[in-house]
Structures are given as C-alpha cells and as structure tokens.
Amino acid sequence: MTRLFRGAFILWVMLRFGLDELFLTSFQKPWLNALARVLSLGRNLKAPRGQRIREALEHLGPIFVKFGQVLSTRRDLLALDIADELARLQDQVPPFASDVAIASIERSFNKKLGDIFVSFDREPIASASIAQVHFAVIKDRNGQLRDVAVKVLRPGMLGVIEKDLSLLRMMAGWVDGL
C-alpha cells in the first residue's frame, strides 16, 4: 500500500510543478497541446521549465535528485537550460536544519559537539541529495588544530531510498511486461 501512496505522491508532485504540461507540449500534436492548456488552467506554471523539473526532483527525494544529477551530465540529451538547472542539484540542494545535523553527530559519537570539535560551523558549506558538509576544527593526537570537513547524512535516508527503489522496480516490471 505504501507504494501506491508514494506513486500518488509522485503524480501529485508532477502535476504541481507542471511536468505533465512539459511532457504533453513536447510532442508536435495540436490535440496534446490543447490538452496541456486545459490541464494547466488554474496552475501557476510561469517558472522556467528547468527550474520546475529541478524543484520537482528535490521534492521527490534523494533517488530522484540523483537521477537529476546524472541527467545533468548528459548535455547531449537535454536542452541546455534544463541541463544547467539540473546541474544545481550537484551541490545546491536545500540544506536540512543544523540542529538535526548536530544531533546526528552527537548521537553517532555519543558525545557533545564541544567534546568532539574545537569549533563547528553551523552553516553548511554544501548540501546535496544524500548529505551536507560543515567545516569544523579538531585537535589531533599531537594537540595541533586541524581544519576538517564533516559530512552528515540526511536523516531517514535509508527508508526513503528503499521505498523509491521498490517503486522503480515495480514500474520497470510494468514496462518490461509491455
């Protein structure tokens, strides 16, 4: 049943960001263009198509962001405006809360942040689909201060990835059956 809900959510996101309109207008058929105009009534689809695709992939989660990252490297397959926008998925995904990152670090080390690092930048330097990176300073074994980058995984990633992969396997089975 969760696959059904996830499939419905994916469909909702596609409609919300107007990906149905992008798909239908990509064909040179007047009746599909007319259908796209009817379906887009009441929706604000003024954002550039690349931005709408990127934002939809961000809303759908890490597997879809990874898919967008891979697509962004295939400029031979995509229009440049779409490839440029998808390239933003490489390291410009919105970060998750720093408090969540800190709690994850403290839970992993079973220590308070101040006991692990001399200093820790709460603002992430980069954020991507699976993790984000914070700069910090540690004291090494010789007592010397060292600058480090701390990569923190997004919370709840494993469950989301497993559900999306299960859904993709099911959809691949449908396609294979056709």
Image (tube, rainbow, N blue to C red):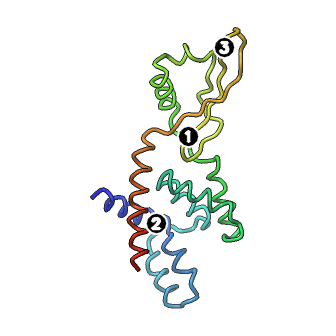
Q: Quadrant of the C terminus?
A: bottom left
Q: Residue at x 61, y 23 (%)?
A: 120
Classify 106 as above or below 94. above
Which of 174/118 is in front?
174
Q: Is residue 138 above or below residue 70?
A: above
Image coords of residue 125 (percent x, y):
65, 36
Q: Secondary structure at mark 3?
A: strand
Label 2 crowd (10 A; few <14 / some 14-19 / many >=20): many
| Residue that numbered label 1 is attached to | 131
Q: Earlier in the sequence, mark 3 or mark 2?
A: 2
**Alpha carbon separation for disc pair 3 and 1:** 24 Å
Question: CA separation, marks 2 and 1?
Answer: 24 Å
The Cα atoms of the two marked residues, 3 and 2, are separated by 48 Å
* Residue designated by label 3: 139
What residue is pinned by disc 2?
A: 14
Label 1: state its secondary structure: strand
